[in-house]
Image (cartoon, helix red, strand yellow):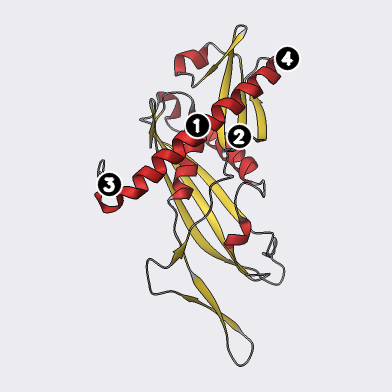
Amino acid sequence: MKVTWSSLLTGVGAFCWTAGPVSSPVCNSTSSQAGKQAFLSSANATPEFEGRGGDDLGTEIANTLSRIFSNKSSVDLQALCISPGEHCWTLYVDVLLLECGGNLFDAISIAVKAAVFNTRIPRVRVLVDEEGSKDIELSDDPYDCIRLSVENVPCIVTLCKIGYRHVVDATLQEEACSLASLLVSVTSKGVVTCMRKVGKGSLEPESIFEMMETGKRVGKVLHSSLQTVLHKEESLGPKRQKVGFLG
């Protein structure tokens, strides 16, 4: 995915998690393992990521995404449950940054939501034999799968404080002029699920309120535009134009 000047490659892997006698957490109808995130950066994205330069940023991004998706309302955890108390799906989200052009958190959240939207999880059945032991059977039909609802999956809106104003979708140059930024995680309905301040500067309470309101307005428009693009691309089917060797 290419968002303004940033390019990212995002993938989602689904793994069947089996509960052991002392395993935790235990999957049930209302609890599951929504996902784990990993962030990798290419040295070509920016010279700052050369060597181990991107490790700290990668950890920060992964922790932020984990905090956002730890909210049970973000992902339908019940859809990930295979057998209550025994088996469930665990989603692993990998993000590779190919080019960094600023506004990184926003671009990654958009890429993650788009990747989850396109994710297909194989449909499985739990078979019980005469002795009572259970076995998981995977469908032979590659099109027999389930999809996760992304209606409540939030997107991040970063608001950079510059002087007495705040900027949305900042470039690298604009981010360099900002001493403090506010990350606002917003759902498609404008509900704020998470908020975090980054940067060494401080923010006044009045500024935080104004930035939150701007983040909610921008977030609703962002979700609407993203859903339109995703549904339009899906409707094309095999006719969808492939870009690059990964298309």
Calculate the distance from the C-alpha at mark 2 to the C-alpha at mark 1: 10 Å
Rendered image: mark on residue 186: 2
Compared to 43, does 209 lie above or below? above
Which one is earlier in the sequence, the residue at label 4 or at label 3? 4
**Mark 1 element type:** helix
Crowd band around label 3 with a 10 angstrom C-alpha radius: few (<14), some (14–19), many (20+): few
Front residue of this view, candidates 123 and 198: 123
Question: Residues at badges 2 and 1 in contact (C-beta under 8 Å)?
Answer: yes
Q: Which residue is mark 4?
A: 206
Calculate the distance from the C-alpha at mark 4 to the C-alpha at mark 2: 19 Å
User: Tag 3: residue type?
Assistant: Arg
Calculate the distance from the C-alpha at mark 1 to the C-alpha at mark 4: 24 Å
User: Tag 4: residue type?
Assistant: Glu
Crowd band around label 1 with a 10 angstrom C-alpha radius: few (<14), some (14–19), many (20+): some
Question: Residues at badges 4 and 2 in contact (C-beta under 8 Å)?
Answer: no
**Mark 4 element type:** helix
Compared to 176, does 2 lie above or below? below
Calculate the distance from the C-alpha at mark 3 to the C-alpha at mark 2: 29 Å
Rendered image: mark on residue 240: 3
Q: Residue at x 42, y 68 (%)?
A: 144
- Is residue 54 shown to the viewer in this render? no
Image location (x, y in percent) of residue 91: 53, 55
**Mark 2 element type:** strand
